[in-house]
Image (tube, rainbow, N blue to C red):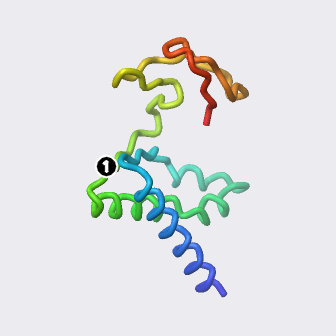
Amino acid sequence: MHSRIRRVREDFLHKLSRKTVKENQVIVVENRAVKNMVKNQNLATSISDAGWGMFCTMLKYKAESEGKIYLEVGRFFPSTHLHLGSNTLLPIAKMNLSVREFDCTHCGQRHIAM
């Protein structure tokens, strides 16, 4: 049973990584401290089951084989506080985590926080 579950999860990760590489020219992932995250007893099993490290490995080798760009940014990179405008990263004011939508002061568009 465990072997079957492992194969199903691995198959899902292969399909998801292939789809992600196929649909994007540049793939940027955040380097997470998974080792520290699994110390939380409430979330350890869910985090381990997600297979983040395996997924990133699959993304990387598939992107490189397709000639796509794969980048890892540090976990402290302020990606949620930056706006890409005119090929430059412009700072956005820090917001509370409850803010899900905001109007950008640089481009005037409404963005949805992810």
Residue occupied by mark 1: 69
Check disc 1 and report its element: helix, strand or loop.
strand
The C terminus, quarter of image: top right
Q: Position of residue 52 (x, y in %)?
A: 51, 59
In the image, 3 versus 93, the foreground residue is 93
- Which residue shows up at 61% across the image and 58% down it? 47
Q: Residues within 10 Å of mark 1 (few under 14, many from 20)?
A: some
**Above/below status of 68 relative to 86:** below
Rendered position, 95 above or below 55: above
Image position of 84 with respect to 103: above or below: below
- The residue shown at (34%, 50%) is 70
Q: Is residue 78 left or right of residue 6?
A: left
Q: Amino acid at mark 1?
A: Ile
Q: Nearer the viewer, residue 50 or 85?
A: 85
Extreme-top residue of the structure = 105
Q: For the point 53% across and 75% down, which residue is it?
A: 11
Residue 88, given in percent of the width and then of the height, sits at 35, 22
Residue 112: image x %, image y %?
63, 31
Question: Residue, x 61% and y 66% (percent of image)?
Answer: 49
Q: Nearer the viewer, residue 3 or 64?
A: 64
Number of numbered discs visible in the structure rendering = 1
- Residue 95 sits in quarter: top right
Tell me where residue 65 sits by quadrant.
bottom left
* Residue 107 appears left or right of 21: right
Tell me the quarter of the image containing the N terminus: bottom right
x, y percent for residue 98: 73, 28
